[in-house]
Image: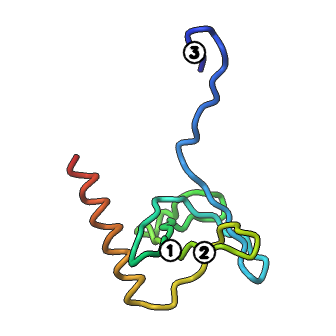
Amino acid sequence: MTDENNNMIPEEEEDNIVELTDEDGVVSKFEYLTTISHEGEEYVVLMVLDEDGNEPEDDDGEVVILQIEQDENGEDIYVSVEDDDVSQAVFDKFMEAMDAEDEE
């Protein structure tokens, strides 16, 4: 793709693939969907992908909700949400946002 001066413009990736490494060193791929604020905290919503970076065909689009925190260097890290009520509340906000987007 080029602009009006025929300069190359990098194409934006259509999918926002995130690779996360767990405490055992296992790398998993996710598609970033959105960030949700809930009770003063930030949460990231990611869709689980297969090892090739594709949505699994036999899955209904499983999502993972992780809390965004900062490590000792001020870098963002994603932490599992242990509280089922918080996970459900964030998921409900995510679904409301998706429904509102579909209505537009």
- Identify which amino acid the numbered label 3 is placed on: Asp
- Quadrant location of residue 31? bottom right
- Identify which amino acid the numbered label 2 is placed on: Glu
Residue plotted at (48% across, 71% down): 42
- Secondary structure category for the residue under label 1: strand
**How far, Cα to Cα, is label 3 from label 2?**
39 Å
Q: What is the number of the mark on residue 64?
A: 1
Q: Is residue 20 left or right of residue 43?
A: right
The N terminus appears in which quarter of the rendering?
Answer: top right
In the image, 70 versus 48, the foreground residue is 70
Residue plotted at (54% across, 68% down): 48
Query: Mark 2 or mark 1, which has the lower sequence index?
Result: 1
Residue at mark 2: 69
In the rendered image, the vertical position of residue 2 relative to residue 28, given as above or below: above
Residue at mark 3: 3
**How far, Cα to Cα, is label 2 from label 1?**
16 Å
Q: Nearer the viewer, mark 2 or mark 1?
A: 2
Q: Residues within 10 Å of mark 1 (few under 14, many from 20)?
A: some
